[in-house]
Image (cartoon, rainbow, N blue to C red):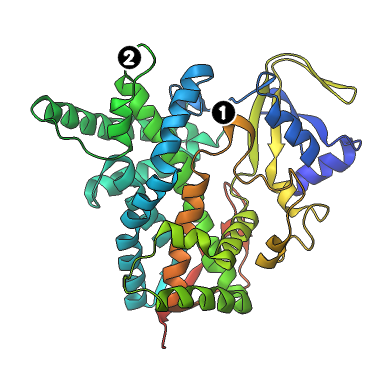
Amino acid sequence: MWSLIMQMNRFGDGVGMYKTHLFGRPSVIVYSPTVIKFVFRADESFKLEWPNVELVGKHSVVAVHGKTHARLRNFISRSVNQPEALRRIAATVQPRMIAALESWAARRTITSYKEIKKVTFENMGMFFASLEPGATLDMLGEYFVGLISGVRSYKMNIPGFAYYHGLQCRKKAIAIFNEELKKRKDFKNGSSESMKDLMDGLMRLKDEEGGQLSDIEIVDNIVAILIGGYESTTLATMWGVYYLAKYPKVLQKLRDENMHLKSSKKEQHVTSDEIFKMKYTMKVVDETIRMANISPLIFRTTTKDVTYKGHTIPKGWNVMLWIRYLHTDPENFNDPLCFNPDRWDVSMTSGTYQVFGGGSRICVGNMLARLQVGIFLYHLSTGYTWDLLNPDGKVKYLSNPKPEDGAEITIEKLKL
C-alpha cells in the first residue's frame, strides 16, 4: 500500500489517477471516488477483465458480457441474493455455525481464520452443490486455496509457481464438480425429482431460444462464485471476531441488541428478516466489511481511448480501481482506521463505500455476504466470550489482510 501511495504522491496531479506498468501492460491506478464512479458507469468503455480469467472460468458470470452476462447474473441473484433465497440460506447455514462455535468453546483455543474458513466452505458447498462435509469437501477446500492463490499471482505456468499450482487445483476441482453433474444427470433420467441448489438451477437455466448451459458453463459459474464468496466471507467474519475483541464497548452494544432479539424468541435460529432489521448489528457488519478491505483492487480494461478531464487512457490499458484506498482515506471517512459502527448513522458521501464494486458488475452476492456475517455475530455475541491471544500482533497484507497468527482466540460459553 505504501508503494502505491508514494506513486500517487509522485505522479498524481489531483485528477485521482496515475499511470504505471503492472501485469505486463501499461496501467492506470484510479483512487478517487469521482473517477471510480466514472469507470463503474461506463461499461462500454471499461470492460471487466480478470488477469487470470482462465482460473476463474472463461464461461462464468464474471467473464462473459452482454445478454449472456445479464441472464446468468439475474439467475444467480435470484438464487443467492433475493429475500426468499436469503431466508432459505439463513436456515441452511446456522446448524454448522452453531456446531462450530460449540466445538470451539470445548477446545478453548482456536485459530479463528482457519476455523471460520472451514465452516464457511461447508455451508457454501451445501447451498451451491449440496456437498456434505467429509473427505471430498475437505479436498475441494484445499483445491480452492490453491486456486485463489493462483488467481492473484503472476502468470508463470511453471512448476513451483502459484499460477501453475492454481491450474492444477482447478483441474482437480472441476473433476469433482463434473462427477457431481454426471450423478445428477443419471438421477434425473429416471426421476422427475430435483435437488434444490445453485448447481441444479444452472442445469435448468435456458436462454431465449431454449438452449441450456453446457457442463463447462455450469462448472465455471460454480467455481467463480465460490472464488468470489469463499475467501471474502471468511475474512470478513474473522475481522468481525477480531475487531469486537478489540472494541469491548462495540461488542456490548451488539450483544445487547442481539440478546433483546434472542429473549423474544423460542427458536434457536434467527431469520434473515430479523438480522436485517437489527440496526446496530448491520452497522457492525458494514463497518467490519469496510475495515476488512478484502478486495484491494478491481480490474477493468479500456475498450477504446477514453478521455477524462483532459487525460487520455489508451485502448487496451489496464485500469485498476484502488478500492482499499477509498476506505482508508481520511477525506472519505473520519479517523478511518478506528472501528466505529456509529459512523453509519449518517449517509456516506456517494462513491466512497465500494466494498462490493459498482455499476452493472456490483457483487451479485452482496446481501448474502452481509447476512452470513450478521448471523455468525448473532450466535457468537449471544453465546460466547472471547479474547485475542495476540491483540497487538502484526498484520500481513498479501494476498489479503489478516493477522499473522490468523486471529487466534480463547473462547468460552457466556455466563449469563
Q: Which structural element holds mark 1?
A: loop
Q: Is residue 165 visible?
A: no
Answer with left or right where residue 287 lies relative to residue 110.
Answer: right
Q: Is residue 142 above or below residue 52?
A: below
Instruction: Name the foreground residue: 393 vs 354.
Output: 354
**Which x, y percent locates residue 197?**
29, 40
**Which x, y percent locates residue 96?**
31, 61
Would you call the spot at circle 2 few (<14 residues within 10 Å), some (14-19), or many (20 or more)? few
Residue tagged 1: 50
Residue type at numbered disc 2? Gly
Q: Is residue 348 visible?
A: yes
Which quarter of the picture shows residue 402?
bottom right
Residue tagged 2: 211
Q: Which structural element holds mark 2?
A: loop
Of circles 2 and 1, the one toward us is: 2
The quadrant of the picture occupied by the C terminus is bottom left
**Which x, y percent locates residue 335?**
78, 63
Answer with left or right where residue 290 lies relative to residue 200.
Answer: right
